[in-house]
Image (cartoon, rainbow, N blue to C red):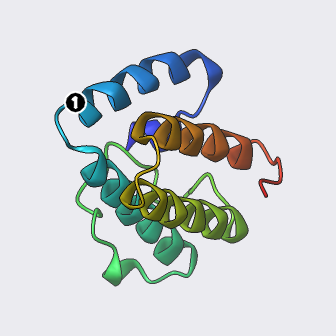
Amino acid sequence: MNMLLNLTTEFMVEYCGWIEKWIKQDLHFFFLEFCLAWLRDFTLLGLRLDREVINKDRPREVDWDRIPFSAEQLQWMMELTIETEMAVQANASKQLALESLLVQYKQIKNGVLVV
């Protein structure tokens, strides 16, 4: 989860290393589902639907009163995650697809339009 909150250049190399390990262990789909679950929670919190949140038991990891993404950013990130999941299922390079997803997340967090 910290990966979604700390999308800074200094951590990107480390995250790419994690992705490589997850792919070798065939855990890349769990990473995508993990991202979707957290993005869903952030979206629900933005809508003030706190009771529906899955990860509310993680108070040390998230300032639940201050989600760092707008509703539009969360929507873009969810769409990109689903597109990445479909691309990987269609035999795209897992490493390239997941690294690209993180770069796009970072761009979105920094206010750059991703198309």
Q: Quadrant of residue 34?
A: bottom left
The residue singled out by tag 1 in the image is: 24
The N terminus is located in which quarter? Answer: top left
The residue type indicated by label 1 comes to Lys
- Who is closer to the viewer here, 65 or 26? 26
Residue at point 29% right, 64% down? 56
33 relative to 12 in the view: left or right: left
State the image coordinates of residue 33 (x, y, percent, origin top left).
32, 60
- Is 16 above or below relative to 85? above
State the image coordinates of residue 13 (x, y, percent, origin top left).
50, 17
Residue at point 44% right, 70% down? 40
- Is 25 above or below relative to 105? above
The C terminus is located in which quarter? Answer: bottom right
Number of callouts in the render? 1
Q: Residue furthest front?
A: 91
Q: Residue furthest left?
A: 25
Residue at point 48% right, 58% down? 87
State the image coordinates of residue 61 (x, y, percent, origin top left).
35, 43
Q: Residues within 10 Å of mark 1 (few under 14, many from 20)?
A: few
20 relative to 109 in the view: left or right: left
State the image coordinates of residue 89 (x, y, percent, origin top left).
37, 60
- Is 14 above or below relative to 49? above
Q: Secondary structure at mark 1?
A: helix
- Who is closer to the viewer here, 29 or 56? 29
Residue at point 35% right, 64% down? 37
